[in-house]
Image (tube, helix red, strand yellow):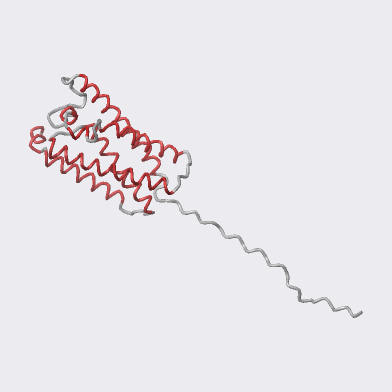
């Protein structure tokens, strides 16, 4: 019986494809954002907590003078007695305690190396956006309706603005070149509005 010769052109086994190096793209501000959320969150949390204590003391005693009532302009008491201070039917600082507790927790988790899912970041984005809108509404009310400033509230304003800015840049994937300039201009705008609104008082201190 005739045997057929074995083909010398047998197909060799396919060579494994070379592994490609995975390129991990870090989000913008990987070092700044965790510290900003942690420190900013703690500052906001302390300010909101102190405001809550002061509000409770004022509710117990209408004649109580809060520790942050310094002069006719820097007067927490004048602000606390308005309807704007209880917009949702309870003291605004209670919202701050909850919100800044979350922000601080996120910051600490990031410092510990946590990787948060995308949906969480967009949830945080919704929160900081509501927060910055609310803060600017309070700024307007303080300047043009109430006519007084609350120092502890101003701490909340100061930390909310950069938290919103850098969370937004992170979620948009933008490593903005002039982010510090934008933040500075934002602060200077608010400071200028405060200076103009209460210039009649500030000028007496010069």
Place of residue 99 in the rendered image (x, y in percent of width and height, measured from the top left): 33, 36
| Foreground residue among 154 and 77 | 77
Q: Residue at x 80, y 77 (%)?
A: 7
In the foreground, 109 or 200: 109
Number of numbered discs: 0
Depicted 205 relative to depicted 128: above or below: above
Give the quadrant of the C terminus. Answer: top left
In this rendering, would 109 be left or right of 149?
right
The image shows residue 52 at horizontal and vertical percentages of 27, 27
Vertical relation: 44 (above or below) 116: above
145 with respect to 119 (left or right): left
Q: Nearer the viewer, residue 105 or 71?
A: 105
Residue at 41% over, 39% down: 106
Q: Residue 14 falls in which quadrant of the image?
A: bottom right
Q: Quadrant of the N terminus?
A: bottom right
Dividing the picture into quadrants, the one containing residue 148 is top left
Direction front: furthest residue: 89
Q: Position of residue 202 (x, y in %)?
A: 11, 35
| Residue at 23% from the left image edge and 32% from the top image edge | 89
In the rendered image, the residue lying farthest to the bottom is 2
Give the residue at the far right of this rendering. 1
Counting from the top left corner in percent of width and height, residue 34 is at 40, 41
Q: Residue at point 16% right, 43% down?
A: 192
In terms of image quadrants, where is residue 160?
top left
């Amino acid at each position: 019986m005739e045997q057929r010769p074995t083909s010398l052109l047998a197909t060799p086994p396919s060579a494994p494809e070379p592994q490609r190096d995975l390129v991990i793209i870090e989000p913008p501000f990987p070092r700044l954002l965790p510290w900003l959320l942690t420190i900013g969150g703690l500052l906001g949390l302390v300010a909101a907590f102190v405001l809550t204590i002061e509000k409770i003391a004022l509710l117990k005693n209408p004649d109580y003078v809060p520790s942050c009532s310094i002069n006719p302009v820097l007067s927490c008491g004048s602000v606390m007695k308005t309807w704007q201070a209880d917009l949702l039917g309870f003291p605004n600082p209670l919202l701050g305690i909850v919100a800044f507790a979350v922000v601080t927790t996120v910051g600490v988790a990031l410092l510990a190396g946590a990787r948060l899912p995308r949906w969480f970041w967009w949830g945080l984005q919704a929160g900081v956006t509501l927060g910055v809108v609310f803060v600017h509404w309070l700024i307007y009310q303080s300047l043009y309706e109430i006519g007084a400033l609350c120092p502890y509230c101003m701490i909340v304003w100061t930390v909310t603005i950069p938290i919103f800015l850098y969370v937004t840049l992170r979620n948009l994937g933008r490593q903005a070149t002039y982010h510090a300039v934008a933040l500075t201009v934002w602060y200077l705008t608010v400071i200028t509005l405060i200076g103009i609104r209460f210039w009649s008082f500030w000028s007496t201190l010069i």
